[in-house]
């Protein structure tokens, strides 16, 4: 299917270039033949330029639509997997409990795993809903102690991923009123949590993530989240923030997702007057995500 879509893109692009080239060639030929008749030449130039422009725009539109459809299909497949896998797991545990007697320890383990699968379902649904509202939501802006918010997100990430304090470290050079931003606490927590989850997921088995918050000048807070994971090819550093986008070849057993997490981070950062970017020395050399927000000045 993917090959078929790529073939369509190549076909429509080649067809558009061919038709545009033909239109330009015919136009110049007509101009050369009628070069002495100024009015006809001018009209001919306008006419053939309009045809060539229309063909190029139409081809570009078709190519974009094909790519959007491919991204949409990838998103549907990812969401379907994220929903079906925990549901199947929960059903298996319930059928086991129903079919035979299990001891108390094994039963408690089944309950723990089912709760984890339920949490995974909840996160997937919440992320899809937040992505759907990303462009329209306008939360209430209040003073937020960003350092305290990041610390809470780090504690939550440690608990959900069962990490030690040394595996996921946090250091802040600012706190209290010095780390205040004006924004929506729920949105900001979503952005920070998504960056942390992304860093942990793509760290592999040996998680080593550092989180640092500091000032850039007097007006901006900068959050840096560094991991030592699989890294990102330089050509993909900007694309990772696109909706539904997932870097090819970064598949890890624990790196499941819908391709919406970093898109939400970018959307929330822009809504708060900030920005987000990614840095990486290449594949296998880790990555750093940088979230910048305007500091609230008294």
Image: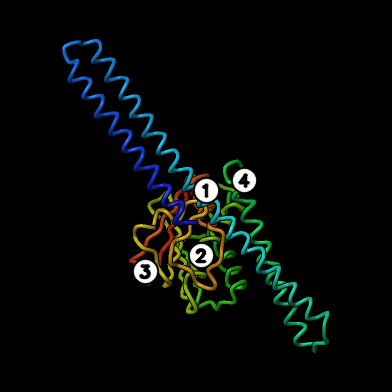
- Counting residues from the start of the chain, the first of labels 1 and 3 encountered is 1
Which residue is labeled 1 in the image?
69
Q: Nearer the viewer, residue 266 or 178?
A: 266
Q: Nearer the viewer, residue 241 or 215?
A: 241
Residue at point 83% right, 87% down? Answer: 101
Identify the element where label 3 is drawn.
Answer: loop
Which-is-in-front pick, marks 1 and 3? 1
**In the depicted structure, whether residue 45 falls above or below residue 78:** above
**In the depicted structure, whether residue 110 falls above or below residue 74:** below
- Counting residues from the start of the chain, the first of labels 2 and 4 encountered is 4
Q: Are marks 2 and 4 in contact (CB under 8 Å)?
A: no
What's the distance in space between the residues labelled 1 and 3, CA to CA? 28 Å
Which residue is labeled 4 in the image?
133
What's the distance in space between the residues labelled 4 and 1, CA to CA? 20 Å
Instruction: Give neighbour class at mark 4: few <14, some 14-19, many 20+ (Cα, 10 Å).
Output: few
Identify the element where label 1 is drawn.
Answer: helix
Which residue is labeled 3 in the image?
283
What's the distance in space between the residues labelled 4 and 3, CA to CA? 33 Å
Which-is-in-front pick, marks 4 and 3? 3
Which residue is labeled 2 in the image?
198
Identify the element where label 2 is drawn.
Answer: helix
Q: Position of residue 14 (x, y in %)?
A: 34, 43
- Counting residues from the start of the chain, the first of labels 2 and 1 encountered is 1
What's the distance in space between the residues labelled 3 and 2, CA to CA? 15 Å
Q: Nearer the viewer, residue 209 or 236?
A: 236
Instruction: Give neighbour class at mark 3: few <14, some 14-19, many 20+ (Cα, 10 Å).
Output: some
Residue at point 51% right, 60% down? Answer: 175
């Amino acid at each position: 299917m993917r090959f078929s879509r790529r073939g369509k893109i190549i076909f429509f692009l080649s067809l558009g270039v061919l038709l545009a080239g033909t239109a330009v060639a015919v136009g110049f030929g007509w101009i050369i033949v009628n070069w002495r008749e100024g009015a006809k030449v001018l009209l001919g130039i306008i006419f053939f330029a309009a045809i060539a422009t229309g063909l190029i725009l139409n081809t570009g539109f078709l190519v974009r639509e094909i790519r959007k459809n491919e991204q949409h299909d990838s998103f549907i497949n990812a969401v379907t997997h994220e929903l079906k896998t925990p549901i199947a797991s929960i059903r298996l545990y319930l059928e086991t409990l129903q079919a035979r007697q299990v001891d108390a320890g094994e039963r408690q383990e089944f309950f723990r795993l089912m709760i984890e699968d339920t949490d995974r379902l909840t996160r997937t649904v919440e992320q899809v809903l937040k992505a759907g509202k990303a462009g329209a939501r306008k939360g209430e802006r209040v003073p937020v102690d960003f350092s305290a918010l990041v610390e809470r997100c780090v504690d939550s990430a440690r608990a959900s991923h069962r990490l030690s304090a040394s595996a996921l470290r946090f250091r802040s050079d600012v706190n209290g009123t010095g780390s205040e931003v004006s924004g929506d606490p729920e949105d900001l927590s979503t952005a920070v949590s998504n960056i942390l989850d992304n860093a942990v997921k793509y760290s592999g088995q040996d998680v080593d993530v550092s989180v640092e918050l500091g000032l850039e000048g007097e007006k901006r807070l900068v959050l840096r989240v560094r991991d030592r994971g699989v890294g990102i090819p330089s050509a993909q550093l900007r694309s990772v923030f696109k909706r539904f986008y997932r870097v090819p070849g970064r598949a890890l057993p624990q790196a499941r997702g819908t391709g919406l997490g970093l898109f939400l981070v970018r959307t929330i950062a822009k809504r708060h007057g900030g920005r987000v970017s990614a840095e990486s020395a290449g594949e296998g050399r880790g990555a750093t995500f940088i979230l910048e927000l305007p500091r609230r000045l008294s």
